[in-house]
Image: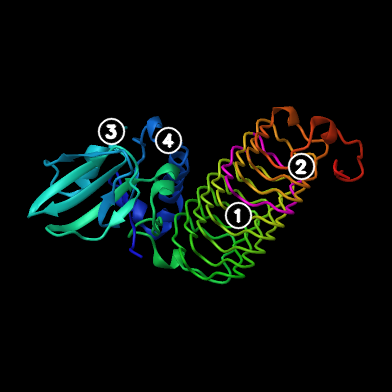
Amino acid sequence: HYPVTVVFSQPMPRRFFSASAFGGSLAVAVCTALVHLARAQSAKDGAPTQGVIWLSSPGDCILAAGTHSRVTWGAETLPKCQEICEKDRKCWAVDFSTYNSYPRCKLLIAPPAGATPKQAGISEATCSIKASQLSRYAFNGRLGSGAMGSHTPVARCMATFNMQAGDYNGCDFQGLKMSGTDFSKASGVGATFSFATLLGFQARESNLRGAMFERTEAQKSKFDFADMSDSMCIGANFRDASMEGVTLTNAKLADAHLDGAVLTKASLQNVDGEKASFRNADMTGADLRGARFTSASFEGAILFEADVTGASFKDADVTGTVWGFVTGFDTVDFTGAKGAPSPDAVACTQKAAPCNPFG
């Protein structure tokens, strides 16, 4: 895969790039911006225009279906091209290249679907997108965050066995083997763990807001009381993971596997769990308000005392799911769901242990 570069939209004072200063103001500001930008839900909401962070990959941008781009010939460099796009809410990405010796700047009105190899007559093509959860979701490929740019001290982002309480904000651990690593109480805001192997990974009480876990293998890992809100976990494998009290608010869990995971008192507010699997997961006391579990699998899962207000289990399989003392059951969308219980069945009376309305 290609390396990806993070480009800051505004020049940073030189003092920010010192070894002592980087772990403070710059890291916090940039990573906070990454989390803030991750909240856009559709192209119609408008592209980010404040504190823009650029993610770049070699090659021409692949336009999303039904969208177009417009060419601006006045921008002679990639930074100039990005500057034009930066303040435009209709501009989600730029495609900069040199066409027959002439610089060409293309502005895209929607997040691109990926990047193509070099084409005839075109040299030094670069596809740059505005960092957001929406743009990362749309891009087909291993688009990581890099290591917070070329100014990041290399040692700060090195993967080791003991990474407790360290500062790894924005670091790129994409594709690495980090099984058994102790990441407890560490900060990895906006970090990339996509395609990494994290078997038995220890991340209790860690800060992983906006982190990327696409297709990550993290079976039997420990994320108890970690903050993983706004994280991208599409296709991730968290089977048998311990995630008690974890915060996954607004996370993308589409196609993720959490079979047998412990999610007691976890916060899954407004998560996108389409086609995710929670078979036999323990979600006792979990907060599922506004969560979307379209076509998800919940066979044998325990949702005792969970708050399911406004949640959707449309077309999901909830056969054998344990319900009891749930909050907001009358607001749940069970349209097309398999094995959905009736409101009367959920009105269980046992208080000593979870009850199964199906006997």
Q: Quadrant of the C terminus?
A: top right
300 vs 28, left or right, is: right
The structure residue drawn at horizontal position 74% and vertical position 54%, both measured from the top left corner, is: 280
Q: Which labelled disc corresponds to residue 285?
A: 2
Mark 1, residue position: 206
* Secondary structure of the residue carrying numbered label 4: loop
Q: Do callouts 1 and 2 mark residues in contact (Cβ within 8 Å)?
A: no
Q: Amino acid at mark 3?
A: Asp
CA gap, disc 3 and disc 4 = 16 Å
- Residue 56 visible at all: no
Label disc, if present, on residue 42 of the rendered structure:
4
Q: Position of residue 154 (x, y in %)?
A: 40, 66
- Magenta residues span 269-289
Question: Element at badge 3?
Answer: loop
Q: Residues within 10 Å of mark 4 (few under 14, many from 20)?
A: few
Q: Residue 166: within the magenta?
A: no
Task: Find out whether the residues at labels 2 and 3 contact each other: C-beta distance under 8 Å.
Answer: no
